[in-house]
Amino acid sequence: RDAEQPEFVGMLPTNTEAECDDVPTSAVLSAKDNCDAGASVSFVENIPASPNARSHQVTRTWTAQDTCGNENVHTQLVTVVDTTAPVFEGVDPDAVVDCAYGTTVCEPIAVDNCDADIAVIADVQTITLGCENHFRLIRTWTATDSAGNTATAKQTVTVEDTVAPVLSHTPADESVSCGEVPEPEVVAAHDNC
């Protein structure tokens, strides 16, 4: 009668922790038996139906069985975590612009190693620097993944008015007698901002 359980061959996988985008593949195990030429090995992996974003466990179970029904079971626990914050792409560099060109901005996106869709929250702070067309915009974007990891990106845009107004309808210089000085003309001024 065979009462001995089969033995796994080689190193057995140990419990481990892994980032959600770097979970190791399951090992392929074999087993030997004292009576049979080889024992069969079955494998079951249990992943939670609704895994927690911050941390969850994957249970891997290998069962070696010989023809007499003797079993040897090995279990590995893989703790899956997300400790990596999202990363911003497409953040424009800080800039100094003339007020005539406006302050349009390309909205950056955030990518994450585990979440496919990351919401980005934008905040804009305006600091007046002395006059209407001279100010600073501080744009801050915040992205948070479902595990609570947060990243921020910032851009500072300084808006300046460096172009003087342009006068139009200005009268030409002329020489007149002291009693013939004309009334002043209406002169218009146009500014780029």
Image (spheres, rainbow, N blue to C red):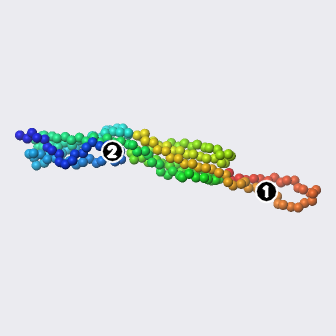
Give the secondary structure at mark 2: strand
The residue shown at (10%, 49%) is: 37
Farthest residue toward the left? 1
In the shown orientation, is residue 104 left or right of residue 163?
left
Residue toward you, 26 or 130: 130
* Type of the residue with mark 2: Ala
Q: x, y percentage for residue 154?
A: 53, 47
Q: Give the side of residue 92 with respect to residue 102, left or right.
A: left
Image point 60% across, 52% down: which residue?
96
* Outermost residue to the right: 179
Q: How many marks?
A: 2
Circle 1: is it few (<14), some (14-19), or many (20+) Cα within 10 Å? Answer: few
Which quadrant of the figure has residue 176?
A: bottom right
Side (left or right) of 180 relative to 62: right
Q: Which mark is residue 169?
A: 1
Which residue shows up at 82% across the image and 58% down it? 171
Residue denoted by label 2: 18
| Residue 192, image x, y percentages | 68, 53
Q: Earlier in the sequence, mark 1 or mark 2?
A: 2
